[in-house]
Image: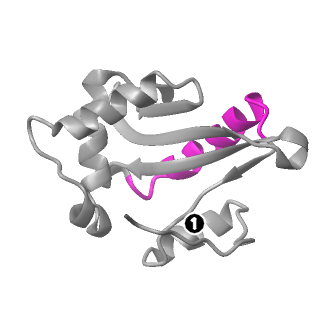
């Protein structure tokens, strides 16, 4: 598997993967051409050195997955850096082949390379299989997450 930084040409595939589940279908707007909001967000991510939008390719250069890592500098933990993993997706026809686990192992190493002292994630409570998967990888539900949508 090849892990690389996403390019603009990858954006439609990324959005297609993000929209390709029960929750994604209710909040995303995958269409051709893509809405400008996605293009603006992609450009912002690409220009921020604390954001890494990653593509995962198989041995045939087919995109099989994507993830985003954000590196957050803060004052607690003696001015520590935490990494946040978001938008982890594997193409439907490649699920159950261990790709997600390889993606997380790669992300853990990458976070350590960037000096992060932890890797965190949030997941929707409507995704019990994902929660079990994260627990299997060693993630612990150590905090109660809260959100305020606008």
Which percent across, then down, holds residue 65?
Answer: 40, 42
Outermost residue toward the front? 150
User: Which SS type dominates the magenta stretch?
Assistant: helix
Which percent across, then down, holds residue 127?
Answer: 45, 74
Q: Is residue 121 left or right of residue 33?
A: right
Question: Magenta residues?
Answer: 95-116
Magenta includes 100?
yes
Outermost residue toward the right? 78
**Near-viewer residue (92 or 145):** 145
Density class for disc 1 (Cα within 10 Å; few <14, some 14-19, many ≥20) is: few
In terms of image quadrants, where is residue 12? top left
Which percent across, then down, holds residue 122?
Answer: 56, 62
Q: Is residue 9 above or below residue 54?
A: above
**Near-viewer residue (74 or 139):** 74
In terms of image quadrants, where is residue 28? bottom left
* Residue for badge 1: 133
Magenta includes 34?
no
In terms of image quadrants, where is residue 9? top left
Q: Coloring scheme of the render?
A: one colour
Outermost residue toward the left? 32
Q: Is residue 91 left or right of residue 112?
A: left
């Amino acid at each position: 598997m090849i892990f690389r930084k996403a390019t603009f040409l990858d954006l439609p595939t990324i959005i297609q993967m993000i929209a390709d589940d029960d929750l994604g279908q209710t909040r995303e707007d995958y269409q051709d051409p893509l809405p400008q909001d996605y293009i603006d967000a992609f450009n912002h991510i690409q220009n921020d050195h604390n954001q890494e939008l990653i593509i995962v390719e198989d041995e045939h250069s087919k995109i099989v997955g994507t993830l985003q890592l954000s590196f957050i500098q803060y004052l607690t933990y003696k001015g520590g850096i935490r990494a946040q993993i978001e938008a982890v997706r594997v193409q439907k026809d490649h699920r159950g082949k261990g790709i997600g686990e390889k993606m997380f192992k790669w992300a853990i190493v990458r976070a350590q390379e960037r000096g992060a002292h932890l890797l965190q994630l949030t997941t929707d409570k409507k995704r019990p299989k994902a929660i079990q998967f994260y627990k299997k990888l060693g993630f612990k539900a150590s905090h109660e997450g809260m959100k305020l949508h606008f």
